[in-house]
Image: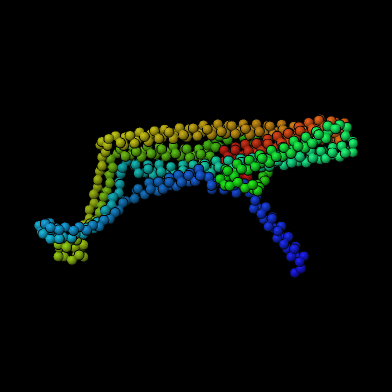
Amino acid sequence: MSLRNYSIIFLLALGFNAHAQQQSNIITLQQCLDTAIKNNLTVQQSAITAERARIGYVQAKDNLIPTVSGGISRELSTGRAINPVTNTYINQAVTSDNYGLSGGVTVFNGLALQNAIKQASLAYQSGKMAYQAAKDIVTVTVITSYLQVLDAEAILNQTKSQLSVAKEGADRVEILEKEGANKLASDVYDQRGLLQASNVNVVTAQNSRSSAMLNLFQVMNISYKRDAELQPLNAEDLRGDKDVLPDQVYQTALEQLADVKAATLMRQSAEKEVKYYKGLLFPSLALGYGINTNYTNSNPISYTNQFKNNYGTYAQLGLNIPIFTNHFKKNQVSLAKLDLLNYQYVEENTKITLRQNVEQAYYNMMAAYNKYQALDEESKAYSESFRISKIRYEAGVLTSVDYITSKNNMDAANLNLISARYDYFIYSKVLDYYQGKLSF
């Protein structure tokens, strides 16, 4: 293989490697969501709480299962003792072995166990909803942060475009100055000032983009990568539903939002907890049973025969009537009622907060949309004004001051339009979250 072919292969390999590195630096929205949810400690704590509730639910069901336990003991007696076989006193060492199995089951206890199962089941469902709510909050935060980065990047690109136009104008004036064709000497300095102002705008936009990217990485709880790039989204497609009303969004949120479901289920769980403690005030009926046998060396009968001959069983039915328990059980009922009242307030406050947030998000969206519409018209007007001003300036019938004023108006309108577009997009996503249809 010739040296030329080796060189071509080497250059191609470098190109592929650079492309692969560039691709590896591109982060998608889904990757951001997965990373943030995985690393968020609040989400992890919610998962632990849900798992604890699941274990509590399993245990509540298992409490209905009869209990069984076994025991083995060996006893050694020396000196004067009673012979367990003849029931007479003897003066020798006696060894005895005892074996037994026993168990019990609650027959009735005021339906306390059944209500405990219902209470634990609802608490488990609430835990799962709280876990989902924690993930939803992280999702909204990530999407908002992601869009803020894209907003900053769009503004950065716009300022770079404005800088390019300013550079063209400055270069043109410099050429005219050298040729002695400038009418005013101040034109050169005006264009230089415009160029430097455009440079400052680019630097400011770069800083804003870096700050927004840093915030996104902090939301994901990972180290900041300066060379990271985000996969762009179609922010031009403004998918907000302007026809939907706050009441409609609120009613949908009541049915869809995990946070509300978690509060409702926790209140229902507290209701069952009250019934559980009330059940403990009733008499309880329990069945006990067991088998046992024993062996002693004071009996000349063999070990095996003693094991068989001494075998016995028993069964007992016990009724426990709580007469006075230092008001402990009554106080437990009172505390459970207070817990229920607290969870009722939590549920109501969750709904009130939800309504307020929905109304605020809706009016933020509409304000952003109206601002976007107005700025769109403003941008078109200033763009046309600058087009005319540029023609007149190049024809020598417009001063550099008027030209710069016209360009600044157009640049400001374009930057404001970008921000308004993304503001509208962000608020639309917040409303989508409340309606349970958050997606890209």
Q: Nearer the viewer, residue 291 or 82?
A: 82
Image location of residue 255, percent across then percent down = 53, 38
Total numbered labels: 0
Q: Who is closer to the viewer here, 174 or 313?
A: 174
Q: Residue at x 43, y 42 (%)?
A: 123
Q: Is the C terminus in the top left, top right, bottom left or bottom right quadrant?
A: top right
Q: Is residue 309 above or below residue 392?
A: below
**Quadrant in the picture for residue 198:** top right
Name the colouring of the figure. rainbow
Query: Residue at (27%, 37%) from the top-left corner?
Result: 325
Q: Position of residue 352 (x, y in %)?
A: 51, 31
State the quadrant of the N terminus.
bottom right
The residue at the point 25 percent across, 54 percent down is 290
Furthest-right residue in view?
A: 180
Residue 190: image quadrant is: top right
Q: Is residue 400 above or below residue 53?
A: above
Q: Nearer the viewer, residue 179 or 145?
A: 179
Query: Residue 19: image x %, image y %?
Result: 69, 55
Image point (36%, 38%), residue name: 275
* Residue extending furthest toward the bottom: 1
Is residue 260 visible to the viewer in this orientation of the structure?
A: yes
Question: Residue 131: x percent and y percent?
Answer: 50, 44
Query: Is residue 278 left or right of 37 when viewed as pictured?
Result: left
- Residue 377 shows in the view: no
**Image check: 74 left or right of 334?**
left
Residue 313 lies left or right of residue 36; in this view the side is left
